[in-house]
Amino acid sequence: MEFPSKLIENAVSELAKLPGVGKKTALRLALHLLKAETETTASLAEALAKMRFEIRYCDTCHNISDTAECSICANKLRDQSTVCVVSDIRDVIAIENTAQYQGTYHVLGGVISPIEGIGPADLTIDSLVDRVTRDGSEIREVILAISPTMEGDTTAFYLSRKLRDLPNVHVSTIARGIPMGGELEYADEITLGRSIVERQRQVK
């Protein structure tokens, strides 16, 4: 693809690095930004820069946050006795959109995948165990809401083994309303909400 300007070419190359964005889409976006008001393009650039360099992760659950504690963990109206374990921040957003869950979360930051070189030590599993076992912990149920892929099931099995012998703590998994091989973020809200409500307690 030939470009009349090196600046346009550079912009298209950077936009095309985004997931799901090809060269033609990247060119269309670049030309749109070029024709837009200067303030519009500047605001977009500023918002992206601030997001990248100023966003934080919650010290407790590892969800994205503007402060040391995310709004969910800081909300005392949430059920502090229940923690929903997810692999990715997008899963928190998906579950919150169902309006069916009022507990807290714990974001693992991925799933165990030996093929990709990701082991338990690369995830926030130790942080989760510490949350559940520390003195004064209110947690009585850990919900494993991990996508039912091979890697997800491996991760859920590992976590259930780590947590199953803890006294007064029940480990449950979301009901299989999510199809095998599916991703939580792509599930419709009714199916995902029902999976949370009809979660199954694991037998110790």
Image (cartoon, rainbow, N blue to C red):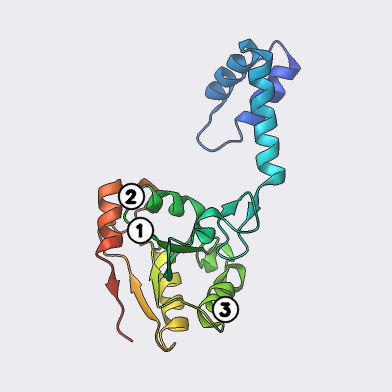
Q: Secondary structure at mark 1?
A: loop
| Quadrant housing residue 62 | bottom right
Image check: 70 left or right of 99? right
Instruction: Estimate the x, y position of residue 73 in percent, counting from the top left.
Output: 52, 61
Residue 13 at least partly seen: no
Q: Amino acid at mark 3?
A: Asp
Q: Amino acid at mark 1?
A: Tyr
1 or 3: tag closer to the N-terminus: 1
Q: Which residue position holds label 1? A: 101
Check disc 3: other Cα within 10 Å, few if <14, some if 14-19, many if 20+. few
Instruction: Estimate the x, y position of residue 167 in percent, counting from the top left.
Output: 42, 89
Q: CA distance from mark 3 to mark 2?
A: 28 Å
Is 106 drawn above or below residue 137 in the view shown?
above
Image check: 107 left or right of 194? right
x 33%, y 87%: residue: 204
How many labels sit on residues?
Answer: 3
